[in-house]
Amino acid sequence: MKTSIIFRYILLAVFNAGVFYAIPLSIAFEAWFLLSLIILNAFLVNIVYLTDRFKPMKWILPGMIFMISFVVFPAIYNTYVSFTNWSTGHILNKTQAIKVLEDRTFTPEDQKDILFDLYVLQDQNL
């Protein structure tokens, strides 16, 4: 057996181990869209690299996976979040927000001051 085939199978085994690690995590976090992307990518990678039928796809598939991961998924996720009430200001409920506002602390009076120099620009010359 050729060394390149053994190396290909070892890399596929490592990739599939990562997929089998990521699937339960995405189920636990209920990230269904991410789960579907993981399964689709794993299926495509295994089909392309285990058969000789899709030789041209061996060069195209990595770029497609990176494009889906870094362009398509964030665009769809941002669109999803924009139609929900899941922005930064809406994470806490009313009682939690009141508690955060009431618990704000300021620097104590006995704390040492920080010295700094302030330069003022006069007559456009320094």
Image (spheres, helix red, strand yellow):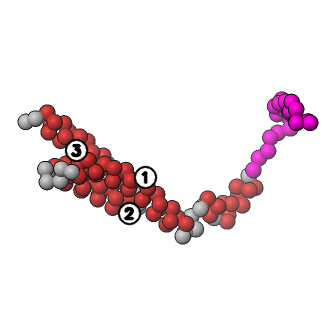
Q: Nearer the viewer, residue 36 or 73?
A: 73
Q: Are discs 2 and 1 less than 8 Å apart at CB? A: no
Q: Which residue is mark 1?
A: 70
| Label 1 SS | helix
Q: Residue at x 54, y 70 (%)?
A: 83
Disc ID at residue 12: 3
Q: Position of residue 113 (x, y in %)?
A: 84, 32
Which of 111 and 48 lies nearest the eye of the viewer? 48
Q: What range is drawn magenta here?
A: 104-126
Give the mark nearer the N terminus: 3 vs 1: 3
Label 3: element kind: helix
Position of 62 with respect to 93 (left or right) is: left
The residue to which callout 2 is attached is: 32
Query: Which badge, 2 or 1, is on the more N-terminal residue?
Result: 2
Mark 3 is on which residue type?
Leu
Report the Cα–Cα distance between label 3 and label 1. 22 Å
Q: Which quarter of the image is occupied by the C terminus?
A: top right
Instruction: Give the spatial CA distance, label 3 vs label 2.
Output: 24 Å
Residue most extreme to the front: 124
Q: Which mark is residue 57?
A: none
Residue displayed at 75% across by 55% down: 102
Query: Residue placed at 59% from the left, 62% from the top?
Result: 87
Quadrant showing the N terminus: top left
Q: Residue furthest bottom?
A: 83
Pointer 3 or 2: first along the chain: 3
